[in-house]
Image: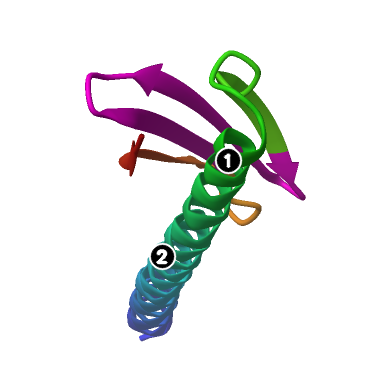
């Protein structure tokens, strides 16, 4: 009789461990995806800010002075390179940041155009 009680207790313990492992994995994945979404949204805002900085630089200075630059917004690293095309300037924007929750590097690459 005692052996059956020990076996039942072992099965109960294994069931509790299995359920807690599944719930921890589920909530951890949910938090990772939500923090990655937040980082991607922030990347979009910083890409727009970097574009505006490059545009203002082109208006104030010439193409050779503003050809490329790197900017840091806190933990976000942004850089742009301007290419001289036929009728417009093409701006290539690269943003990088590390997600503090899971240390994944989130990247954002964007190309914009400015008329000459």
| Crowding near the residue tagged with mark 1, few <14, some 14–19, many ≥20 C-alpha atoms within 10 Å | few
**Residue that label 2 marks:** 37
| Magenta stretch encompasses residue 90 | yes
| Towards the viewer: 21 or 15 | 21
| Crowding near the residue tagged with mark 2, few <14, some 14–19, many ≥20 C-alpha atoms within 10 Å | few
Q: Position of residue 31 (x, y in %)?
A: 48, 70
Q: Identify the image quadrant of the C terminus.
A: top left
Q: Earlier in the sequence, mark 1 or mark 2?
A: 2
Question: Which of the 4 quarters of the picture holds residue 17?
Answer: bottom left
**Residue 99 shows up from this direction:** yes
For the point 57% across and 30% down, which residue is it? 79
| Towards the viewer: 98 or 60 | 60
Judged from this view, the residue extending furthest toward the top is 64
| Magenta stretch encompasses residue 27 | no
Q: Position of residue 19 (x, y in %)?
A: 36, 77
Q: Position of residue 87 (x, y in %)?
A: 23, 28
Q: Seen in the image, is 25 located left or right of residue 70? A: left
Q: Secondary structure at mark 2?
A: helix
For the point 77% across and 50% down, which residue is it? 74
Looking at the rendering, the stretch of residues picked out in magenta corresponds to 72-97
Question: Which of the 4 quarters of the picture holds residue 92?
Answer: top left
What coloring was used for the rendering? rainbow
Q: Identify the image quadrant of the N terminus.
A: bottom left
**Residue that label 1 marks:** 59
């Amino acid at each position: 009789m005692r052996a059956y009680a020990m076996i039942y207790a072992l099965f109960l313990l294994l069931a509790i461990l299995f359920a807690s492992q599944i719930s921890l994995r589920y909530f951890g994945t949910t938090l990772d995806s939500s923090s990655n979404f937040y980082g991607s949204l922030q990347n979009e805002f910083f890409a727009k800010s970097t574009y505006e900085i490059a545009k203002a630089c082109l208006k104030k200075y010439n193409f050779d002075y503003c050809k490329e630059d790197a900017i840091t917004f806190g933990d976000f690293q942004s850089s742009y390179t301007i290419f001289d095309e036929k009728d417009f300037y093409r701006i290539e924007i690269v943003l990088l940041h590390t997600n503090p929750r899971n240390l994944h590097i989130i990247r954002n690459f964007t190309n914009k155009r400015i008329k000459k």
